[in-house]
Image: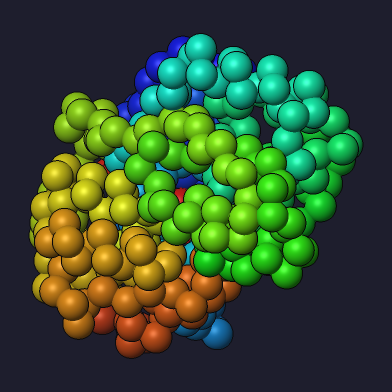
Amino acid sequence: MSTADPAPESRREAETAGPGSNSGPGSDSNSGSSSGSGSDRSAHPRDEGPARRPLSGRVVLVPRLREPDPLARALRTAGAAAVRAALTRAVPGDAAELASASARLAAGDYDWLVVTSARTVEMLDVGATPTSTAVAAVGSATAGALAAALGRDPELVAGGSARSLLDALAGRGVAPGARVLLPQSALAAPLLAEGLRGLGARVERVDAYTTRTVGAADLPPGLVGRWRAGGVDAVVVTAGSTARAVVELLGPAPPGTAVVTLGGPSRAAALAAGLAPDDAVTASPSPRPADVVAEIGRRLRPLQPGSRTGATPPHPPVDRIEEP
């Protein structure tokens, strides 16, 4: 179980994927690797192949660092340049509370362990969870993190949202009186906890971590200028805290920048934060990378070959840019 306050991902950490790259994949830790300030990559990628992909020439901001990141990979496959930058950092919850919950989990005090984020697995010691405790994951990424920590697959994997997880647990017949450990972000909406209590479960909610906005000094060089000059075609809002961090660090989305969120709660948070007007913010039908990419493609019309020439002023290189 981690008790240290993890620093934000280094603004000098770099990864440039694609032909001609001279740096290997980065990680979410402070590796200190750099893409080099002498990169002459264009602010927008060029696709000179015979079959243009749906997001060819587009730049999409993914405001997180995750290794691996299926969303960034899907964007590259669709032809986009994925600019990745961590705008928030996770801060562990109360160490004593986390240790106590971990001990009760290991002792078999719960019928269900319900996990809504892969980050929770970094904060709570779940490795000793007995087989008598069923484990539920909100989606595939969380399921993968749990499987690695547990040495077995979770009994239930939902569709990527709190609502789908609640519905799946109800379908599995969570019985009245069932003991449920629900470690979550301190900023998580109460929907899941209240829904489980509505099924008659005895829910112990633990604040595994909270999320805070990084400092401006932790941003990759050039990102603010690129954003404000309209050099980003779309941004993916992965959580409510991300929406608030984008506004705080970069400012509201410029006209023409599409805002796509991973669900309804994130869309509501984006609107509340003033990230963009109502008609400029849409929620992906699911958090699956293919659905997010399809929603971005629906919002952005395909570029014509050469249409980027002279369209935007040059920008300093951004550390975390991945081209197809």
Q: How many marks?
A: 0
Q: Residue at x 49, y 14 (%)?
A: 95
Q: Position of residue 94 (x, y in %)?
A: 44, 18
Q: Nearer the viewer, residue 175 or 182?
A: 175
Q: Residue at x 79, y 28 (%)?
A: 108
Q: Quadrant of residue 310?
A: bottom left
Asked whether residue 121 appears in the rendered view, the answer is: yes
Q: Nearer the viewer, residue 272 or 86?
A: 272
Q: Quadrant of the N terminus?
A: top right
Q: Nearer the viewer, residue 81 or 138?
A: 138
Q: Position of residue 239 (x, y in %)?
A: 37, 53
Q: In the figure, 272 relative to 309: above or below?
A: above
Asked if residue 219 lies left or right of residue 138, the reply is left
Q: Residue at x 17, y 32 (%)?
A: 216
Q: Nearer the viewer, residue 255 or 301?
A: 255
Q: Position of residue 220 (x, y in %)?
A: 27, 37
Q: Position of residue 54 (x, y in %)?
A: 47, 81
Asked whether residue 18 appears in the rendered view, the answer is: no
Asked if residue 161 lies left or right of residue 139, the reply is left
Q: In the figure, 280 relative to 146: above or below?
A: below
Q: Residue at x 19, y 66 (%)?
A: 271
Asked if residue 278 lies left or right of residue 185, the reply is left
Colour scheme shown: rainbow
